[in-house]
């Protein structure tokens, strides 16, 4: 079973900010929150990861409150090319750990 | 640095035949993972290998499925006597020796269709 819960789908328009929330009530102390993006007919691609507070890179921001029971992936000013499935995962910082994927959130961006 | 390579990209097999899926990890990566994705589903872990060793095969069906990662050459996922339920996308991922668990680089996948 996936350790995380996220909405099945979201819709947005180009230029808007999109926030996808992920619940992980029973996250383990040594788990990091990780987000992957998957386009149709492609393998998943790592986007961002964090343990606590806020992390930002060139693609997205990740907000994790102090209790770590949830997190929010923020995509600024989405474009049509951001249409994809986004997976929220909890994984320990340990090589060789299998990633547990849920069904993810299908983000559809329209013009 | 080339990414993870998988071949073939598409594979059609009749029921009862064998399917062989190949995965070449990124240069310098010694960890290989195989995942299976059914339509409209998330990826499901199958097996984790290092060179010449199967480390974790807890997600692999006990029968008909096997995997290897030889000292030389690609990792191979082998499915014997395929059935329609084996139709899925099979993804390989690789990671460097001392990386975090989340740092897995995925290939484009092999789409297996069993007729």
Image (cartoon, rainbow, N blue to C red):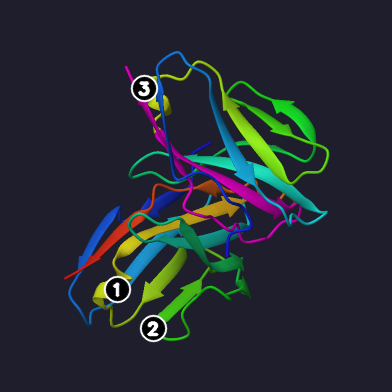
- Magenta-colored span: A84-111
Above-or-below relation of A19 to B66: above
Badge 2 density bin: few <14, some 14–19, many ≥20, Cα 10 Å: few
Task: Report the Cα–Cα distance between label 3 and label 1.
Answer: 34 Å
Secondary structure of the residue carrying tag 3 is helix
Quarter of the N terminus of chain A within the rendering: bottom right
| Subunit that carries the residue with mark 1 | B
Tell me: A22 left or right of B97: left
Task: Report the Cα–Cα distance between label 3 and label 2.
Answer: 42 Å
Q: Residue B54 at x, y = what percent?
A: 60, 74
Badges 3 and 2, same chain: no
| Subunit that carries the residue with mark 2 | B
Tell me: B14 left or right of B10: left
Whether residue B1 is visible, yes or no, is yes
Residue B83 lies in the magenta-colored region: no
Task: Report the Cα–Cα distance between label 1 and label 2.
Answer: 12 Å
Name which residue lies at 57% across and 75% down.
Answer: B57
Tell me: A97 left or right of A105: right
| Subunit that carries the residue with mark 3 | A
- The residue beneath circle 1 is B85
Most extreme residue toward the top, as rendered?
A: A15
Quarter of the C terminus of chain A within the rendering: top left
- The residue beneath circle 3 is A80
Viewer-closest of A7 and A32: A7
- The residue beneath circle 2 is B64
Name which residue lies at 71% across and 53% down.
Answer: A25
Q: Nearer the observer, disc 3 or disc 2?
A: 3
Badge 1 density bin: few <14, some 14–19, many ≥20, Cα 10 Å: few
Comes first in the chain, label 1 or label 2: 2
Secondary structure of the residue carrying tag 1 is helix
Viewer-closest of B75 and A46: A46
Secondary structure of the residue carrying tag 2 is loop
């Amino acid at each position: 079973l996936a350790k995380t819960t996220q909405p099945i789908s979201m819709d947005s328009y180009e230029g808007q900010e999109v926030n996808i929330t992920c619940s992980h009530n029973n996250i383990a102390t040594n788990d990091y929150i990780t987000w992957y993006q998957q386009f149709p007919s492609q393998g998943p691609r790592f986007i961002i990861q964090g343990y606590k507070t806020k992390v930002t890179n060139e693609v997205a921001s990740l907000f994790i409150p102090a209790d770590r029971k949830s997190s929010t992936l923020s995509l600024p000013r989405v474009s049509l090319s951001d249409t994809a499935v986004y997976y929220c995962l909890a994984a320990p910082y340990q090589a060789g750990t299998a990633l547990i994927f849920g069904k993810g959130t299908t983000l559809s961006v329209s013009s | 640095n080339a990414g993870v390579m998988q071949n073939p990209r598409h594979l059609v097999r009749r029921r009862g035949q064998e399917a062989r899926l190949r995965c070449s990890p990124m240069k310098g990566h010694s960890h290989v993972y195989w995942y299976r994705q059914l339509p409209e589903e998330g990826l499901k872990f199958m097996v984790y290998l290092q060179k010449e060793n199967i480390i974790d095969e807890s997600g692999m069906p006990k029968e008909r499925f096997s995997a290897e990662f030889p000292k030389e050459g690609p990792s191979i996922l082998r499915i014997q006597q395929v059935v329609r339920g084996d139709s899925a996308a099979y993804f390989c991922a690789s990671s460097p020796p001392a990386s975090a668990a989340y740092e897995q680089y995925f290939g484009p996948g092999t789409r297996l269709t069993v007729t």
